[in-house]
Amino acid sequence: MEKIVIIGNGIAGVTAARHIRKLSDKEITIISAETDYFFSRTALMYVYMGHMKFEHTQPYENWFWKKNRINLIKGYVEKVNPKEQLLQLQNGQEIPYDQLILATGSKPNKFGWPGQDLKGVQGLVSKQDLDALEANAPNNKVCKRAVVVGGGLIGIELCEMLRSREIPVTFIVRESSFWNGVLPNGESQLINEHIKEHHIDLRLGMNLGEIHGDENGKVEAITIKETGEVIDCQMVGLTAGVTPNINFLKDSGIELGKGIKVNRFLETNFPNIFAIGDCAEQHEAIGNRRPIEAVWYTGRMMGETVAQTICGNKTKYNPGHWFNSAKFLDVEYQTYGWVFSERNKKEYEKHFHWRHPEEKVCITMAYHADTGKFLGLNTFGIRMRHEVFDRWLTEECSADYVLEHLKDANFDPEFYKAYENLIVAKYNTDTGSHIQTKKKSWKRILSLGA
Amino acid sequence: MNNTADRSMALTGEPPKALNLQQKLATLFGMTGMGILVLALMNINFENRALWLTLSLLAISGGIVWFSYAAYANTQPGIKNDGVMFKSISSRGFWGWIAGIALTGFYIVLYFYPQYLGLTKEGDNTGLIALFDPLSKLLSGNPASQWFVYGTLYTVAILAFGIKFLYKYRHNAYERLRTISVMFFQTAFAFLIPELMARLNGEGFSLPYYDLKNIWPLNYYNFERYRVNSFIDAGDIGLALLIFGILSIFVITPILTYKYGKRWYCSWVCGCGGLAETAGDSFRQLSDKSLFAWRVERWVVHSVVVFVTLMTTAVIYSYLGNDTSKYWLTKTTFLIGVATFLTAIFAWVMIYKREQLKKDATYGAIGYFVIIIALIGIHFFSGDGNVFLFKSEALRKTYSFLIGSIFSGVIGTGFYPIFGNRVWCRFGCPMAAILGFQQRLFSKFRITTNGGQCISCGNCSTYCEMGIDVRAYAQKGQNIVRSSCVGCGICSAVCPRGVLKLENGPAKGRINSQDVLLGNDVDLMQLVNENK
Ligand SMILES: Cc1cc2nc3c(=O)[nH]c(=O)nc-3n(C[C@H](O)[C@H](O)[C@H](O)COP(=O)(O)OP(=O)(O)OC[C@H]3O[C@@H](n4cnc5c(N)ncnc54)[C@H](O)[C@@H]3O)c2cc1C
Ligand code: SF4
Ligand code: SF4
């Protein structure tokens, strides 16, 4: 029987395994060094905050793997030998394969900061990082202050985690406003304010200069590059992005860039070796996407796709409309289609922004300056219906149409305050239009009949 | 220098676990209220009972409300689950077990040894029950009973912990509204109205105690002989109540469940649900999510339905007559009626809803045949409503002991801190099972999953008090249409990615099933999802 071996038991590898099992009887083995069973990396924060136990982050019960005949091996792959189709584990064990899927994920970036390898300096990506955090910052007596470096999604999560134990946090962000390489100004500003509401010492436009250790090699302070200010701290979180986990492939002959180079079929330069998830790098970016997309959904979609190819139905990786979501402390964020920050905005991209006068609620809609075509929407503090936005993007609806039918897309819990009328009123004032919101229609939402 | 560091933060304790000073004081305050009750229990005689009772109840509620204020006042509106898994009370730690044992003990005394609470058959009450006499006399004119004491404490718990819940979920309109609703129904319908109704009773007129929102089979005793007799004896009002009791199970319930799902009852009206959602809120994460637990749940809860149906049928049968000239409803007509009704439901499900039931169909079939055979048994073997060898009275007593007392009280509530807050609702409540059956097959309610947005984090499953593995559906892009879902809305509230929405919508598109989720190639989605 054909042997499929998958390195990495994250969302990408596990989705691939599940779908291959659905489609075939092939022998499936997943090798991973991190944990015995698949867990949801996105939920690591909730374990430290005490919302969940680690077991709760495991989406499948432990019997699932055996029942579905998916072999699990805990071990670190040291070498891949594509010529002999052989893997070598750290413990010396050798594992042959017919087809190999690399789903090795990513690790935190380190930019060569002095002191970056001191004790108490860590990233937040793996289960081991979580354990380290529990040791480095168990409470505010051991860790009197923590410094988090890098203003992205993981950085703000780490701040929230530390604050849940009332550990004072200094948050060093290189950008002049939080995540404004991605978010338009209005939204970025809203999050700046919210970060401060949570008593986080936000330092915008600053860089980490140096990390200082004590005589035991443990971190005791950092210096801010711009001001030279020294901040005493017992923990430093490095959250300035992630980079693919590919060191062990250096001499394998597999073509590498920043990640593992793949074509649209997710094939590497060896036809029986594939790469999916965080570690895969497209030769050419697909649409507005980046060549490496370190997000959950991409891993899952690539897993769904590669399973088809492996089971005989060769399928291109052809993702649909972009979407994503996150939560900044108490504010939920969703995005559908493309809304770029001022920094990366296309020349034809126009924005409409509305923000609630008191609450932490706002939206930004991007549309085409000439045609009025709807391009994308960011929402903060309002949930939207994925299906409806996906359809509007496919049908290339106009911005006017989207606003007129915005009630169809609302996904907030029942009885929540509705903001559509306020939003549309602002749009009418801004653009001189005369749009009126339409009542929610199930017929349209579910495309039932005409 | 741009420095907003909050240097005044209190630097003590390990906050996800520890209580702050105010919370400690609030606990102490609430405990003094409990202390008064304990002293009364130990037969310390209070001179002015009305005053001491008022003080006690005020201190208990005040303590709880103060505690909540101290916990949430200085926080931003949002999810408040920090430290839940570290606190010993909410993670089956030491305090969890202590609370469980204390509650269980209380229930055992309440149900089986009320004399220790001060219930006196002849003469005046003593002890704890006597302390509640003034309030009882104020409301109904009668001295208190152990049930009055229980009802009062129950209502106080729902109100005080309800306020805590309102505070905790102050950002969530759905949670707030439904909590106000259970607080109202408990206070008005379960507590005040029946007590006031008792005032109407006097010479020649007597209504049975009736909590109008309690529906058969939750009030399994509603159609017992003495109650039916006293309804009938009470003339028009009594008859109206009896008819209301029948309509509520056969007409009102199906209509509301069709429109809104069983949540209209379980999370908006019901007293058991009310206590679970308020006082039990800290324990919802303790429910067992395993597939095994789900299997046990289906067997146990459906057995209870079969049991209660048979028991009620047998009890009614036992007091009906044989003579058609006296009353149209005779033993035989009644049995045939029950059998026809059940057969009609069974046939309808098998013909129209088979698809949706799949494996569960066997359970349904087994349950149905057990009942029918037992009905035939009743007909041939008894004059007295025997079900085979068991007398209907024995059945009733067993049911009332095993299900009515042990399961719903001792295990259902006593074990909150061990098995979670909805053990009774999930494993034992026949009402929930019947509503769930409707919800599954004949309702507009569903929890919609938001396309491909799920990140499998597991918050929803962890906090589902009914032990539903919500994530298992959400990560497949599948709507949640489960008979056991009580529509508490917490899964939707705790989801950090806005994936879940409880809603009532058209039947088409309610049940969906997807292998490839929204966001991937449209052709691939079509290929995989249609070739299943
Ligand atoms: C804290 C945090 C929060 C996040 N939140 C979000 C979010 O909200 N939304 C979102 O879209 N994305 C989020 N992400 C990103 C998302 O989690 C990742 O994109 C996704 O988990 C990647 O999945 P993967 O399967 O590609 O790799 P991974 O999940 O990283 O799995 C790779 C596995 O392979 C193992 N491995 C690597 N090399 C070897 C080897 N040589 N031998 C054996 N095993 C090996 C690794 O140990 C690891 O277990 C978050 C990430 C983090 C860290
Ligand atoms: S809480 Fe939301 S994101 Fe997390 S598993 Fe449940 S549905 Fe998915
Ligand atoms: S599925 Fe959600 S709404 Fe239903 S009972 Fe569970 S947590 Fe409550």
Image (spheres, rainbow, N blue to C red):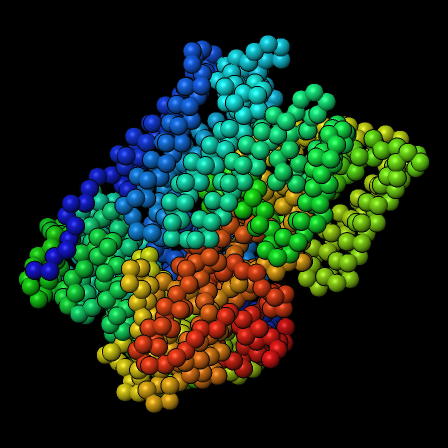
Residue B195 quadrant: top right
Work out whether residue B9 can be spotted. yes
Q: Residue furthest bottom?
A: A370
In the image, residue B430 above or below residue A282: above
In the rendered image, residue B183, in percent from the top left (x then y), is placed at: 49, 40
- Horizontal relation, residue B33 to residue A159: left or right: right
User: What quarter of the picture does the N terminus of chain B occupy?
Assistant: bottom left
User: What quarter of the picture does the C terminus of chain B occupy?
Assistant: bottom right
- Horizontal relation, residue A252 to residue B282: left or right: left
In the rendered image, residue A74, in percent from the top left (x then y), is placed at: 43, 59
Residue at left offset 16%, top offset 62%: A203
Residue sitting nearer the eye, B445 or B481: B445
Residue at left offset 59%, top offset 58%: B445
Residue at left offset 32%, top offset 40%: B69
Residue sitting nearer the eye, A346 or A207: A346
Residue A254 quadrant: bottom left
In the rendered image, residue B280, in percent from the top left (x then y), is placed at: 48, 39
In the image, residue A86 above or below residue B485: below
